[in-house]
Amino acid sequence: MKLSGKHLFILKISGIVALSIAGAALFVKGLYFSAILVLILIILLATSLYNSRRKLIEKMERMIAGIRYSDFSFHFADNQSKDELGRLSKEMEDALQIFRDRTHDSLMDEAETQAWQKLISVLTHEIMNSIAPIISLSETIAERAANGMPSEEEYRLMKRAMETIHRRSKGLLSFVQNYRQLTRIPDPVKQPIDILSLLKHLQQLVSANGIRFAYTSYPERLIVVADRNMLEQMLINLLKNASEATVSQVSPLITVKAEQVGNIVQVTVSDNGSGIASQALDKIFIPFYTTKQGGSGIGLSLTRQMMIRHKGTISVKSDETGSAFTLSFPG
């Protein structure tokens, strides 16, 4: 029968006390060699006792350090031990898991709140930028019309004002349509897709817009389970961005690399442009955020939402030598 840690602890303490008394008696009687042997046994028992306590303390220190540095991947459970140390480890692991869950929920709530705040800020900014000049110009036109028949110069001013109102109204309508597009992504209709065949078709499709790219697939017969229309749209978005990023390069280079990584199928679109500023990297997937003149800021947001629908991810690496966007589809 295996003794529990509690009983072993008591036995070790009792052994140390008993051996200490025996060693003292042997020393008094002049049996020095025997007393030294007893002393060695006492040291061995004390070392064993110290090591068993030290292991628990080290685990606690690692857990506390993990919490201090926000590393919640540490697991405290000791599945091999059924004594009170094991039970204590299990209780501490359960407590740590509750802490992980609460922290995760808190972070998710904070991230969701920030996302809504950013979205409302963008919506408010865009709508106000369009509505303010429309109201101002319409008031100006109404005032001039109230003064009777306008002169030729006033008529030209009124015409330009009406053109501005028309242009801003169309811009606002386009903005709202883009927003609707972003919030109405359907569930993907998944099917097996031959990546190599898709890339050949895509190369012909985008070449009409002056976009050129090279592609590779490993293995050559690589199949991804995805919605074909969505996958094409995502790749077109990334290729369009890559083309715009390399427009100032003497030798522009865009490549698409598809590969199997474990159970994941990855499709990476790379370019040799000037890269994305580090301060913009964490914002490029925010709806309507753009660093390009005249950009809508929904291409990457749309791509990310489609990848979420596929239960996949999109990631980016960028420096002064170019950018690489990777679509990762689960197997």
Image (tube, rainbow, N blue to C red):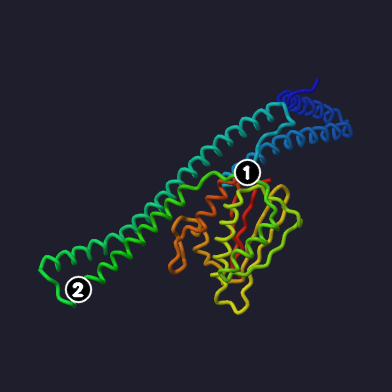
Residue visible at 43% across and 67% down in the picture: 294
- Displayed quadrant of residue 327: bottom right
User: Which is more N-terminal, label 2 or label 1?
Assistant: 1
Q: Where residue 325 appears, x then y in whole percent?
A: 60, 60
Residue type pointed to by label 1: Ser
Please tell me how crowded label 1 is: few (under 14), some (14-19), or many (20+) other residues with Cα within 10 Å.
Answer: few
Q: Residue 65: tell me if it is visible.
A: no
Place of residue 206 in the rendered image (x, y in percent of width and height, measured from the top left): 59, 65
In the displayed structure, would residue 85 be above or below residue 151?
Answer: above
Residue 95 in the image: state x and y as whole percent.
57, 33
Residue assigned mark 1 = 73
Residues packed near mark 2 inside 10 Å, few (<14), some (14 to 19) or many (20 plus):
some
**Is residue 243 found left or right of 57 in the rendered image?**
left
- Which quarter of the picture shows residue 25? top right
Mark 1, mark 2: which one is toward the viewer? 2
The answer to whether the residue labelled 1 contacts the one labelled 2, judged by CB atoms less than 8 Å apart, is no
Point 36% across, 57% down: residue: 173
Residue 149: name its quadrant.
bottom left
- Left of 90 or right of it: where is 162? left
Q: Secondary structure at mark 2?
A: helix
- Residue 247 spot, x, y in % from top left: 55, 74
Residue type (three-letter) at the residue carrying disc 2: Tyr
Q: CA distance from mark 1 to mark 2?
A: 70 Å
Q: Looking at the image, which is closer to me, 19 or 253?
A: 253
The residue lying toward the viewer, choosing from 161 and 293, is 161
Which residue is at the front of the view, 156 or 325? 156
Which mark identifies residue 103? none
Give above or below for 134 relative to 27.
Answer: below
The residue wearing badge 2 is: 155
Farthest residue toward the bottom?
A: 250
